Amino acid sequence: MRGSHLVAAVALLGAALACLAAAAPPAARGEGEQCRVRAPPTPEERRARRARECSHLVFEYMKRHTADFEAAHNVSKLVFFLHVPRTAGKTYANCFLRTALPPSKRCAKSYDVLRYNVSAPGCTAIISHDDFSAAEQLLPPNAATITQLRRPVDRIVGAYEFAVDVAARGVLHQGPPGKLGRRKSDWVGTLEVWPWSVLIPWFKRNMKARMDALKEGAKEDPTAWRDYRSPKNRTYWWNEAKNSSVWVLPPPDPVLDPYNNSLVMPLHEWVEHPIAEELMHNGGTLQVLGLTNFSHWPREEAAPLRACLRSNAVAREMLLKLATKRLRAMAHVGLTERLEESVVSMAADLGIDLEGPAYRYTSANAFSYDIGAEDDDALITYNATTAGGVNVTVTRRQAVQRANAILDQLMEHRQRLDVILPRLRELVDQETRWLQEQGVPGAAAAGHSSSSSSSGANQAATQGAAGEPQHAPASLAPGSAPQQQQQQQQAVADEQAAAVDPEGNVLDGNTEAAAYAEDEDESGSAVGSSSSEQGSVGAAGQGAAQATAEVGADAEQAAIKSPWSTEIEALDEEASSRQEASRQLEAELASLHDSDMLVLADQATGQARQVVSDEHYLIPNETLGQAYRRCAHAGHTRREKRKPYKHLRTPWGETFTFSTDSRQRIARSTLERIHRLNSVDEELWREGDRILTEKLAAQRAANALQAFPPPPAPLPPQQLPDRKRRLRSLDAPPPLPADGEGAEGGAAAAGAPPTAAAKQQQQQQQQQGSTGTAGQPAQAAELVRDEL
């Protein structure tokens, strides 16, 4: 209080001196004139002045940016999906909108930068995190805008979870990031996408500071895992209480409160932080208005209006009314909480047939950019896998022709496998039931050999991941061949599971440089292949190799004879052969795509040319409605499979994991605070709910709504016989990866990051004899001896 009084007094004195200095001479003044000192404005006066300024800014906004309220939108010309982050926009856009459109009708991916100018001519759908300013500034005037809204409390909590999930990967990263491979023409990394390009690096810095503080505080704690450097500058950990030193820490224990712990800024603190206010609070309204800090309008126009929305009640009410008017002028508005209703309504709004064809939504290699006639004769080199793995040099024109020929062969194999595999499954089930009725003991034994072997592998892999190899028995030592193979398989499985983020996005193999891919590529797309395709061409990359069955199991399989044996063996042989051929073709196609056959979208200055026809992206045997259902379910399943963090853990092995149940632990006061901070978004969401309800009623009255096909009813468990015959085409496990080289040689020396199998093998070899000497953690005698 004393300070504020002093400031006011100084200001008053300064005003008085200025008044006296500027006063006229006494002769020029009237007798009654006096020098009046103007007092500083009161808080009420400042608020009134700010209200006048904000009202003026809002009126100026209305003059310049509200022509779209009455404009007609042409949904057949161009649809702009204004994707508000964390509103299930991926499910909305990828599983439905992109899946409904062939590649020729999709614009280039634009999450990092709007690429409408380099899209294929005639594209009709563009999807972006950009706000409405992009529609006004960069898109045709008759573009139809659609969006999806979500309750702000759930959206803010979801943004916190997602940012922590991504930032936790690589938070302890040491050294320069590994080299990325050639990126696909429409691959976009999360760290390139607003608002994650700002929020995730901020979380990583915050986490790093917290982790350093925890390590400093644990230096004298004997129960903590403390890190040291080996003579070869590798990190290992020592635990005095356990008398153990290891190369790889044991799995962390998820016992911390996910929203209030020492590893991450707690949720209740983060929502009060300026970065949350700038990027997330009332973000849906700001995107609809075009006033985010990512706006394409001038900063001096958008920033003051954002400040008015936050600080002035009159301006806030005026801007909310403008946002609701724009929402009603859009071609479609959906809600995350009413996702399926929203999709059905959007299908009616955009004239999309749920019984129509479905396309794999990724089109990474369907287009090439800036390739004219003068470029087609340029030479490129690729690996011809189908010709024995030799390098071949051809022109770009010939490479495109070869790529299309490969796609034709793949489609032929796929179509044939779509016939063979269902028939093969049917025959095997018939044979199984017949063998059970006949009571053939050999068949039963064969049926159990696979499952028992599998369970043993899983158990051994689990033991191998326990983090304390020094206590493993000799038969399960990390260096033994069977255990090594099982652990390699587990490492590959873990890497594949970790390559998909909670939203279904695929990692590009380098968590520090690439983080998460904002959109899936073909290898991880939930709608990238139909269920039958996953069993055919998709299986070619996983289970096409010869099954490595045990000798005893092979003898039992050879003894199985039934009326269907000959046909089963013939079909299995053909299917396995086609799967192997597909694998070779896919490898060659990947080599072509990784060459300079295609110019990428982010290198383009002109429009794209389609090099792969739409028909190659058709999902066989599925309608759009079926593909959407499967895609949406797969995305939900992936989100539920989150694991504890590998790097984000206390020195005592504690971590946390987000889940649906964990949200129940958020303090009610925190949720209420989020609600108050996002009151404008809450009102906009309510308006969106009213719009959707009214639209559905009108569409229902016009008989314009379609129904999703019902999901196939699963057979009761007792009607699903156990398969007794092992088949290469259906039951073969994924082949074991080739023996990887250490991080200091092989692929790593060439600049490529080592595979998970190589890392696992290296760790297994160096974990032998990993117990350190009590009281001498810096020596870690046997670890160092193994390393040297």
Image (cartoon, helix red, strand yellow):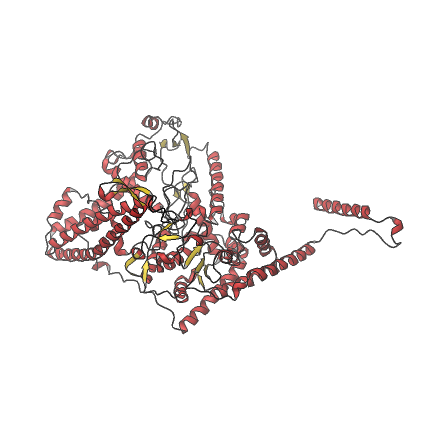
> Quadrant location of residue 345?
bottom left
Q: Nearer the viewer, residue 352 or 547?
A: 352
Residue 618 lies, in percent from the top left, at 30, 57
- Tell me if 35 is positioned left or right of 277 in this view: right
| Along the viewing direction, whichever of 290 and 92 lies nearer the viewer | 290
Residue 297 image point, x, y percent:
54, 54
Assign the C terminus to one quadrant of the image. top left
> Could you say which quadrant of the image residue 455 lies in?
top left
In this view, the residue in front, 760 or 437, is 760
Q: Nearer the viewer, residue 87 or 352?
A: 352
Question: Going by the image, does 177 lie left or right of 581?
Answer: right
Q: Is residue 610 above or below residue 350?
A: above
Viewer can see residue 257? no
Q: Is residue 677 left or right of residue 542?
A: right
The percent position of residue 179, horizontal first and vertical second, equals 38, 38
x, y percent for residue 620: 27, 58
Extreme residue toward the front, this view: 374
Look at 49% across and 38% down and name the residue there. 209
- Residue drawn at x 23%, y 58% is 717
Left or right, 211 with reference to 762: right
Is 476 above or below relative to 395?
above
Residue 130 visible, this angle: yes
Total marks in image: 0
